[in-house]
């Protein structure tokens, strides 16, 4: 499971920002549960979730990564994310005061290498029309990211 502290930068491919490190570990862990994940996804104008993941049965999970108490306290938008997922999680490192996180939300303990689900939130099924719109946006975003990796110049004119 969690092998290193979130601040360990001995891996040259480790993202520099602690929140990005948590997101990387979350994405790796979700892949182990057969989920496909995207980071920095905008489900609606004015919203940007840290991680959105699509499960094997079409379920959609959102994970917000919080690097410290101040990062959590400054987040005023997270309740708006609840309308865009079937389950909502927080991802924090082992030093985060988890008692600050609201009941009824999920919890993952993460670092830059992995994550573990320690509290599963209740499922709140998305309305079918919203799910369909999210699935299309997820697919288009993923396809654009793949195209950008295969053709770096694509980003300049996309």
Image: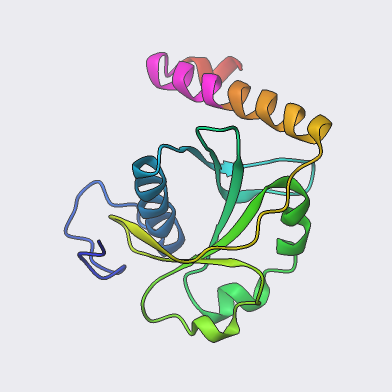
* Residue 10, quarter of the rendered image: bottom left
Left or right of residue 82: residue 66: left
Measured from the top left, where is residue 33 in percent x and y?
Answer: 39, 44
Number of callouts: 0
Residue occupying image coordinates x 71% and y 32%: 134
Which one is nearer the viewer's eye here, 107 or 49?
107
Relative height, residue 155 to residue 95 (above, below): above
Measured from the top left, where is residue 116 in percent x and y?
Answer: 37, 62
Left or right of residue 44: residue 90: left
Instruction: List the single residue furthest toward the left.
Output: 10
- Which quadrant: the N terminus? bottom left
Rendering colour mode:
rainbow
* Residue 101, quarter of the rendered image: bottom right
- Which quadrant: the C terminus? top right
Residue occupying image coordinates x 41% and y 46%: 30
Q: Does residue 106 belong to the magenta stretch?
A: no
Measured from the top left, where is residue 57 in percent x and y?
Answer: 56, 33
Which one is nearer the viewer's eye here, 62 or 46?
62
Which one is nearer the viewer's eye here, 81 or 7?
81
What secondary structure characterizes most of the magenta part? helix
Residue occupying image coordinates x 50% and y 32%: 56
Residue numbers of the magenta segment: 142-152
Relative height, residue 69 to residue 67 (above, below): below
* Residue 112, quarter of the rendered image: bottom left
Q: Does residue 151 belong to the magenta stretch?
A: yes
């Amino acid at each position: 499971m969690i092998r290193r502290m979130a601040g360990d930068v001995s891996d040259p491919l480790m993202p520099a920002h602690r929140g990005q490190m948590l997101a990387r570990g979350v994405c790796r862990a979700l892949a182990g549960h057969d989920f496909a994940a995207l980071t920095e996804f905008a489900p609606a104008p004015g919203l940007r979730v840290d991680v959105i993941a699509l499960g094997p049965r079409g379920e959609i999970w959102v994970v917000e990564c919080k690097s410290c108490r101040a990062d959590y306290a400054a987040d005023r938008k997270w309740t708006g994310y609840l309308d865009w997922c079937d389950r909502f999680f927080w991802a924090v490192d082992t030093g985060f005061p988890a008692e600050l996180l609201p009941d009824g939300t999920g919890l993952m303990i993460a670092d830059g290498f992995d994550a573990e689900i320690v509290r599963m939130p209740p499922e709140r099924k998305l309305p079918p029309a919203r799910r369909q719109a999210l699935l299309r946006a997820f697919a288009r975003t993923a396809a654009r990211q793949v195209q950008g990796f295969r053709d770096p110049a694509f980003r300049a004119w996309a």
